Image (cartoon, helix red, strand yellow):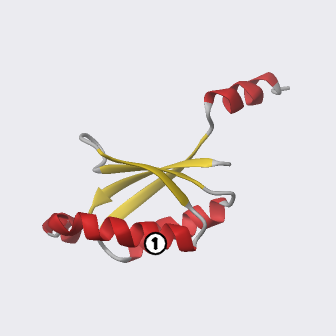
């Protein structure tokens, strides 16, 4: 199943309400489930991004809907990247013309 990495940054509103992050996490899980997106891992990070989510979904469209709906709440801004595990990456390289 395709893997995606979502990089999230809290908005001003989001960081002011950071104590509600656990409640928002449950809402995000419910949204993901509704959109057939499986949240595999959530990381609090330091550096350029505040949070990283590792998700899987058969449909990149569903991941885009999840990211858009999550951002629309006004708590986070998202950036999404498709990720290929090493075995798939090696296969892609081996099939280059």
Query: Which of the two residues, 78 or 29, is positioned nearer the viewer here?
Result: 29
For disc 1, the marked residue is 30
Residue ID at (81%, 26%): 96
Residue ID at (36%, 63%): 77
Q: Residue furthest bottom?
A: 73
Where residue 72 sits in the image (x, y, percent)? Answer: 40, 76
- Seen in the image, is 74 located left or right of residue 81? left
Q: Quadrant of the C terminus?
A: top right
Where residue 56 sits in the image (x, y, percent)? Answer: 58, 52
Total numbered labels: 1
Where residue 64 sits in the image (x, y, percent)? Answer: 56, 64
Where residue 21 sits in the image (x, y, percent)? Answer: 24, 64
Dividing the picture into quadrants, the one containing residue 10 is: bottom left
Residue ID at (65%, 48%): 2
Q: Residue furthest right?
A: 97
Circle 1 crowding by C-alpha within 10 Å: few under 14, some 14–19, many from 20: few
Residue ID at (83%, 27%): 95
Please, is residue 63 above or below residue 94 in the view?
below
Secondary structure found at label 1: helix
């Amino acid at each position: 199943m395709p893997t995606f990495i979502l990089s999230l940054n809290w908005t001003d509103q989001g960081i002011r309400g950071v104590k509600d992050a656990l409640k928002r996490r449950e809402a995000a899980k419910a949204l993901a489930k509704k959109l057939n997106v499986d949240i595999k891992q959530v990381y609090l990070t330091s550096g350029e991004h505040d949070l990283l989510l590792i998700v899987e979904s058969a449909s990149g469209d569903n991941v885009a809907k999840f990211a858009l709906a999550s951002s629309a709440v006004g708590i986070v801004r998202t950036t999404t990247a498709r990720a290929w595990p090493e075995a798939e990456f090696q296969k892609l390289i081996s099939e280059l013309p």
